[in-house]
Image (spheres, rainbow, N blue to C red):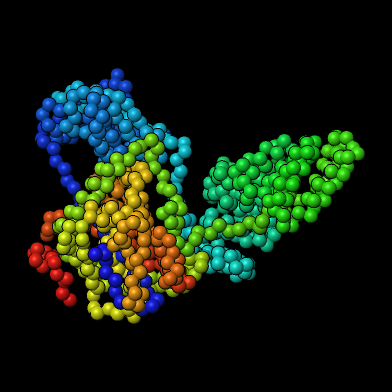
Amino acid sequence: MQCGFAVGLPDHAPRFPGALLILLACLASAALAQMPVPKDPTVNIGATIESLRTYRTTPGTAVLVFHVFAEKNGAHMDRQAVLTLMSVATRTGVVATTDDTSVGYFTDVGLGSYEIEISAVGYLPYRQELKAVDITRPVDYDVVLKHDPNAVNLDVSSSIPSAKARKQAKHAISALKSGNLKVAQKELDQAYKVAPTSPELNFLLGYLYFEKKDFDQAGNFLGTAASLNPRNGQALTLLGRAHLERKDFPAARSALEQAILSDADNWLPHDLLADTYLRQKEYGRARDEAQVAITKGKTVASPAELVLGQALLGLGQDKDGVQALNTFLEQSPKNALAGQVRTLIAEINERNTSRTTSASSAIAAGNLAGVDSLAALDAPTLQVKPWAPPGVDDVQPPVASGTQCPTGQVLAESGQRVQELVDDLSRFAAVEDLFHQPLDPYGIPIRTEVRKYDYVAAISERQPGMVSIDEFRSDKLTLADYPDQIASTGFITLALVFHPGMRDDFDMVCEGLGEWRGQASWLVHFQQRADHPNRMHSYKVGEQVYRVDIKGRAWITADKFQIVRIEADLVKPMPEIRLLSEHQAVEYGPIPFASKKTVLWLPKTAEIYFDFRKHHFYRRHSFDHYMLFSVDAQEKTKAPKG
């Protein structure tokens, strides 16, 4: 039985299942109060005075307490860390996580030798051997984690505070993409009056003036954008190019050197910096930077071959210079400068037959001014965020380096949470808010529609591994009652990917220890197996049902193994129904039910981006005001009435 139920939809309406989540697990140990130990500076990995705290442990066992600090300021970590305690004798381990005060601990620790490993996203793992020998009181350790130099900070924030200004900026982007500079100027000028200190708006205005070839104004706005956001490699690169167009070579060098520091993997600032050196006749530096650009960009960086060739000619290395120029022609035979480059090569070859190398080099150097290597570059393009987020395989979230994922435990524990949910949850209700927008190709909303429903869902497992989920919305809704006549249902089903009865339908890989909203989480990638039935996801168009294979990633907390977020994409497009893409992102949170004395992890928001029949759509479901209903075992096998 497929998780989620199709509804009768017209020819243009898809259906979406989504996801749901899990019970909190509360673990208790045998009771024995332990008092803290004062700081002992002789301990290798430190010790602290622990505030009054009671630990429960088995008599005759030790309590180990770890206080985790960040390297830079000695403060407690701003994110969860995962602690793994491994017995040297048995090579078995247990896992714990730090709490809000960045403290993690182990109870019921038998006497003996252990290895402790502490990991957090963005930090190098810490490893140390220790001995558990004191059963009379907790033993405290201070641990300082060092920052991982290869960690990438993915935080992104917008500096446009006004909703109106943001909307005007989006319209300006659309106009820039279509080449309508007049409309773009009008929209950006209005937005700039509201938010003149926005780095995004200053960058867009700098790009606009660059397109208009007003390089002085472009430099002014791009310089402001770069000063407001010194890590914006795109703004710094375009600023350097504007200065290069103005022949302000010192300013170009400064901007491009900063661009390289902020975006070292991009070949373009290296190429532009090489061009800057070339124009200042610093041929050695021009050669070196051009070679870096070619290494990073490969054939895409063919304009750097032109810079390299001319730099080598300037150094008197005619043979190597001509070879680089020929490589440029091979990679870019239709470039506007191809004719000039061929003329230069022919002249060098001709004169080399009758002149010395030094004379040839001088002649070649004299011809360099006739080939404007900057003109070989394509016009700058605006890197605009796409209308939909990147797919699960397009971006790899950062994970803690050197931390091994306990795959079996993660899958078993998260599956147990889902099974517990199915066992304990029969029916719940909520208030559902639906936010729907058709989008233009640049992500700008065409219109916005809002709906509110009374939502009811019922879950039952009529036989092991066969989970049935029914959903109902208030009133007798027809497709005409949904925006664009598209009904999206079944978001509580996506977490069932991890249900023990359905887990084998997917290939699952634990990618490592990441985080979600500061909480340490294991990242698990999943994909529908081709040799197993698809029981998770489908579209119903008219009366025809189309099974849609999905792949995705789940964030599972390292302490309780609760699923806090799932993203999912199509494994491949569905051209038979003109479904080109779909991206789901569902977040979950603990919902307390006081009358039942329980806490369930249920969907809080579910977002969908989909490209269907040449239209882009964004839809967000939000759930609140949950209620839980009790039914007996016999009634659980029936669909709810009404």
Q: Position of residue 525 (x, y in %)?
A: 36, 50
Residue located at (25% from left, 37% from top): 95
In the image, 328 versus 289, the foreground residue is 328
Image quadrant assignment for residue 337:
bottom right
* Residue 241 falls left or right of residue 499: right
Q: Position of residue 73 (x, y in %)?
A: 39, 34
Q: Position of residue 443 (x, y in %)?
A: 48, 65
Residue located at (16% from left, 34% from top): 55
* Residue 340 falls left or right of residue 196: right
Q: Position of residue 642 (x, y in %)?
A: 17, 76
In the image, 327 versus 630, the foreground residue is 327
The image quadrant where one finds the N terminus is: bottom left
Residue located at (24% from left, 79% from top): 476
Image quadrant assignment for residue 141:
top left
- Quick check: can you spot residue 509? yes
The image shows residue 538, relative to residue 508, as above or below, that is below
The image shows residue 321, relative to residue 491, as above or below, that is above
In the image, 214 versus 362, the foreground residue is 362
- Quick check: can you spot residue 216? no
* Residue 581 falls left or right of residue 364: left
In the image, 500 versus 566, the foreground residue is 500
Seen as rendered, the residue at the extreme front is: 531
Residue located at (66% from left, 61% from top): 211
